[in-house]
Image (cartoon, rainbow, N blue to C red):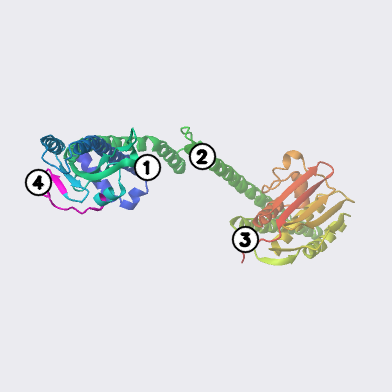
Amino acid sequence: MDTEQIGSRAADFFKQLKIKDILKSLRVRFFIIVFVTGVVSCLVLHTMILDSYEARAVSVRSTEVQTQLRILANHLIMYNYLQDTSSDVINAELDMLANLYDGRVMVINDDLKVVKDTYNISQGKTIISEEVVNCLKKGSKGTISKYDNANGYIEMITPIIESQVIEEGDVSIVGDSNEVVRGVLLTSVSTDTIETTLSVLSTRAKNMEMIIILVILVFAVVVSYALLKPFDRITAAINDVKAGYTDQPIIGPNYYETEQIINAFNSLLRRMKVLDDSRQEFVSNVSHELKTPITSIKVLADSLITQENIPAEVYKDFMTDIVAEIDREDKIINDLLALVKMDKKASGLNITSVDVVALTENVLKRLRPIARKKNVELTLESNRAINAEIDEVKISLVIMNLVENAIKYNKDDGWVRVELDADHQFFTVKVADSGMGIPEESLDHIYERFYRVDKSRSREIGGTGLGLSIARNAVIMHRGTIEAESVLGEGTTFTIKIPLMCGNTKTN
């Protein structure tokens, strides 16, 4: 592929991209930040250097001229030039100073009259200038300097000072208090040479800036590509996982930011694997649990079909077993539907103000006939009245599942104790029993769907293995917690903690 084809394809690519899409790119934004920062730094440095040079050059020129003007002011007093301007020496000095600095020098006496003008324009005229008047009135002993950048000159006002000698007996006194301002030197000094130097420096600086900007441009491109390349590799790895080419964790460079992204994604990937394994196991368990009653029903039905002249008692026993298997199948299906609804949050929460003590008493009232059959003592202890904003149906289901399990998996002549308590934020339901207990290694699995500690006894009792999963989901929907403690052979205690106010949860 030749250069023209590459350029054409690149042009077509950029035509298809919208400006807003380009600006969304982190690489483009990083490039712009680096490039703009570099260019602005160059421009600021350019301005600062030129301004610094200009200020320094003006300061040096002003100091140099001021020295010459002080010497000249002393000569003016020495030759009495303010009264007699015929001195060839002073006139030569004035002309030489004006020519040397390409400027203009005016000698003004204390009557504001121009006694000498190197331009021979204002000589003999009266000049009224605020700076000159102030210099004469206040008796300033220093040179006043002012730089006019627009017109390209430095204006300086230098006082012409005469020191008077006071005779006191045989002593002559000369001091600052005896100095008198006799006139002013008003000088304008051209700064053309400074401007010329600035122009040359500015041209050279611009050439250097162009080179530096090109270097910054290349640097910004290289750095933006190099630093953000790991993100491209992460994106490619994520796309491979998404496409199904791999399910291995991502391994990337040791950037702090990329490590955070990689760790978060790998955690999500592990979670997805766990969910996928759980889903497959769930489907397998559902198939097994649903198939078992159907198989039993089929076996019973085939037995009835293949046998002739079956006594009514046998026929009735077979039909009773078939009905029991159908009831078991119906219970499994209903529990599955309830669990699916909670998983998808399809039903939400119907939040109302509920008397938790009364709700628990009603649940225990319905379960007491089951407890009597096993001679299990069922008691309720409440330390205070409890009113909570909860979903009454779902919390009833939670308490019923826990208490029913405590009764079914209990010993004969055992006990089940339900305790209620509350503080200013949560209410607590504790269900303790004297049953067979749960092995420590099983405590982490009891909320898994279809998990049974003792599978043979669970089927004998009639459990579906979904009760604790339903209870846990209902508690989580209320933003609560459920914990289990158990000692094998002594009993189990479930503790539920639910906020008194669930107003931040979806309400139907």
Task: Identify residue for label 1.
Answer: 30
* Quarter of the figure that contains the C terminus: bottom right
Q: Nearer the viewer, mark 1 or mark 4?
A: 4
Looking at numbered disc 3 in the image, what kind of residue is underneath it? Answer: Asn
C-alpha span from label 1 to label 2: 20 Å
According to the picture, the residue beneath numbered tag 2 turns out to be 260
Nearer-the-camera pick, 173 or 118: 173
Asked if the magenta segment contains residue 298, the reply would be: no
For this rendering, which residue is in front, 410 or 54?
A: 54
Give the Cα separation between the discs numbered 4 and 2. 82 Å
Q: What element does badge 4 sit on?
A: loop
Instruction: Name the residue: 20% across, 48% down.
Output: 150
Tell me how far mark 3 sits from mark 4, CA to CA.
94 Å
* Spatial CA span between label 1 and label 4: 65 Å
Q: Which residue is drawn at 47% across and 38% down?
A: 258
Say whether residue 408 is left or right of residue 228: right
Q: Nearer the viewer, residue 396 or 451?
A: 396
Q: Quarter of the image containing the N terminus?
A: top left
Amino acid under label 2? Gln
Which labelled disc corresponds to residue 504? 3
Looking at the image, residue 156 lies above or below residue 331: above
